[in-house]
Image (cartoon, grey):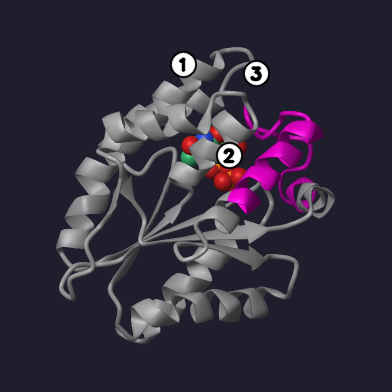
Amino acid sequence: MTSQNSSANIGRFISIEGGEGCGKSTQIKQIANRLSSIGIDVIITREPGGTDNAEAIRELLLSGGDNRWDSRAEALLFAAARGDHVRNLIKPALMRGQWVLCDRFLESSRAYQSGGSGLSDATILQLHEIGSEGFLPDRVLVLDLDEDDANERVSMRDGDVRDRIGGRPKTFHTAVRQAFRSYAEQDSDRIKLINASAAVDEVTDNIMDVLGDMINA
Ligand code: TYD
């Protein structure tokens, strides 16, 4: 697997990960504002989605009953959507020198389709090799929040409405959280665990600290 090269005129690719309700959307906007304010050209995108084709796959993945897809079909669809996104949006933006902030990426597939759904991590990485030639973010930010606090935030935001995957039981989301935490432990240079229970601006400050070396490079 290769993370994208870090030559000065190429942008940086940062994914923001975590369970439902961990505050990703708020933090992505805050980080984009902070980076823009220091002259960095930044775009925000999301997964599943980001391109027309990947957004069409998103609709297939997130609507319908929980058993609509089995875990293999689901993992394949995420990998296909990601491949289109990488080829047609992420890599071209990086080549233009833009920084790309991506709301979820590979670690979500590892956590939800493997940690939560029983496929092996090796299988998910293999699918990523096929779909996206193993392309990796320069930095992965995992926003970590206790499941009960996260669920409370989601209920305040969305009431009882959950998408096909978000609506899975608490045990599933606990396994997802543990999986995210383990990736940060295994690859601590690239994957950073951020405590998402602090105040919004404090969380952003902590994120900017862990991006410091890339900003000053
Ligand atoms: P979204 O509405 O973007 O959720 P959130 O606001 O929590 O980010 O829906 C994305 C859902 O898809 C979410 O439940 C996580 C799941 N997902 C996977 O299961 N695997 C993946 O690879 C990705 C990118 C998302």
Q: CA distance from mark 1 to mark 2?
A: 16 Å
Q: Earlier in the sequence, mark 3 or mark 2?
A: 3
- Give the x, y percent position of residue 195: 69, 67
Tell me if residue 155 comes above or below residue 54 in the rendering.
Answer: below
**Mark 2 sits on what residue?**
111
Q: CA distance from mark 3 to mark 2?
A: 17 Å
**Observer-nearest residue: 27 or 173?**
173
| Viewer can see residue 49 | yes
Dot 1 surroundings within 10 Å: few (below 14), some, or many (20 or more)? few
Q: CA distance from mark 3 to mark 1?
A: 13 Å
- Residue placed at 79% from the left, 48% from the top? 147
Q: Which type of secondary structure does the marked residue at label 3 adopt?
A: loop
Q: Nearer the viewer, mark 3 or mark 1?
A: 1
Give the left or right position of residue 67, taking residue 149 as reference: left
In the image, the segment drawn in magenta is 153-182
Q: Nearer the viewer, mark 3 or mark 2?
A: 2
